Image (cartoon, grey):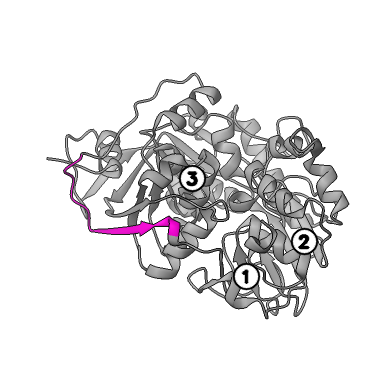
Amino acid sequence: MSMTITEKIIAKAAGCEHVQPDENVWINVDILLTHDICGPGTIGVFKREFGDTAKVWDKNKVVIIPDHYIYTKDEKAHRNVDTLRDFAKEQDLPYFYDPGTISYKGVCHDALPQEGHVRPGEVIFGTDSHTCTHGALGAFSSGIGNTDAGFVMGTGKLLIKVPKTLRFNINGEKPDYITGKDIILRIIGDIGVDGATYCAMEFRGDTISKMSIEERMTICNMAIEAGGKNGIIEPDDKAIEYIKSKTGQPFEALYSDPDCSVEKDYDYDVSSFVPCIAEPHLPSKYAPASERSDVKIDHAYIGSCTGGKITDFIMAAKILKGNRVSVDTFLVPATVEVAEGLITESIDGKSLVEIFAEAGCIDIAPPSCAACLGGPEDTFGRTKNNEVVISTTNRNFIGRMGSKDAPVYLASPLTVAASAITGKITDPRNFM
């Protein structure tokens, strides 16, 4: 029987010839990811269920990346990192990326593929809903809770229900002013925050195949904002080349059968798309940027796993070059590698760092999640009362970036940069 790529990966991990939607199967896990927010809870479950002296099922498959609240004076936040540090030492874990050391990498969702932990055809679980990012490289990757993660930590297995697949066929000539963020916000706007509940969101089509790996990551990252169990893109030559540049580990790329059945197909012509935003307080509140030009902003934010990659900063720099921002504009690279790229990457002979400095942006923060999840009061870029924010992040719930009174608009790096210049929501085509 034919299967989708998600079903094939699950079947392989379950040791089955075939699986079908809604079937419950035990699967073997290839990577377990956790960080400073959920890691201590996961460790607590693991020790409670398996004993204080128990060892993780495979130390080479547990990846711990503190990234959320690490640049702060908050003692409780530091205590979380200390718990992870002690556990990594106790378990002799080779993949603990310790803040404050040369091993630190940055935000887990960007660092995981960067460090070669993401491979096609494999199963990745992480204690973070945006773990679905890694489906951009042909993996089944999904967020789980601390209890499930604690069980995986001890056994390397998890019982899951096979998700139905929603297939998004995205074709057409993509205009330069349309980004991965515009595409996924349009989709979420169409189907709603519950439109893909516990479904695999498979993205395909000519437009997807022409997009960079990082832009594909942006799309898969936000599958969870529609309720998706996972986002996934079949691994083409571009993806295989990227993976081989990051790891020498063997892998088996899997692909949907041509005649596989899916729950529903959605067809899009990207040539008709316009730059957009998601209004407070849901990622599904889609609106064309040009229709919200009356909304004044106080704060622009470029960063996070969704919007802090090097390609995101290059897009923003193309808009900001030769212009000045009129509101506080915060820059937070997702990883150390991205931070270094801000120095080495240039446009017309000027480094991105120089472009941002001349544009009047606030100093670049060290790589982390920073204000994307609010954080302690001393978090870089955290919102204040009644501060209207436009951000490249992935979620705009009430209080998401700090203050409960600060409305957050989500947008692409192009739209955020254009809005930072004018001080109001602005269609980036005005600067292109």
The residue segment tinted magenta is 258-271
Secondary structure type for disc 2 = loop
Q: Which is nearer the N-term, disc 3 or disc 1?
A: 3
Q: Is residue 29 above or below residue 432?
A: above
Is 51 on the left or on the right of 229, as rendered?
right
Quadrant assignment for the N terminus: top left
Q: Amino acid at mark 3?
A: Arg
Q: Amino acid at mark 2?
A: Gly
Q: Amino acid at mark 1?
A: Tyr
Q: Which is nearer the N-term, disc 3 or disc 2?
A: 3
- For label 3, the residue is 216
Is residue 266 magenta-colored?
A: yes
Q: CA distance from mark 3 to mark 1?
A: 21 Å
| Mark identifier at residue 409 | 1
Q: Is residue 132 visible?
A: yes
- For label 2, the residue is 381
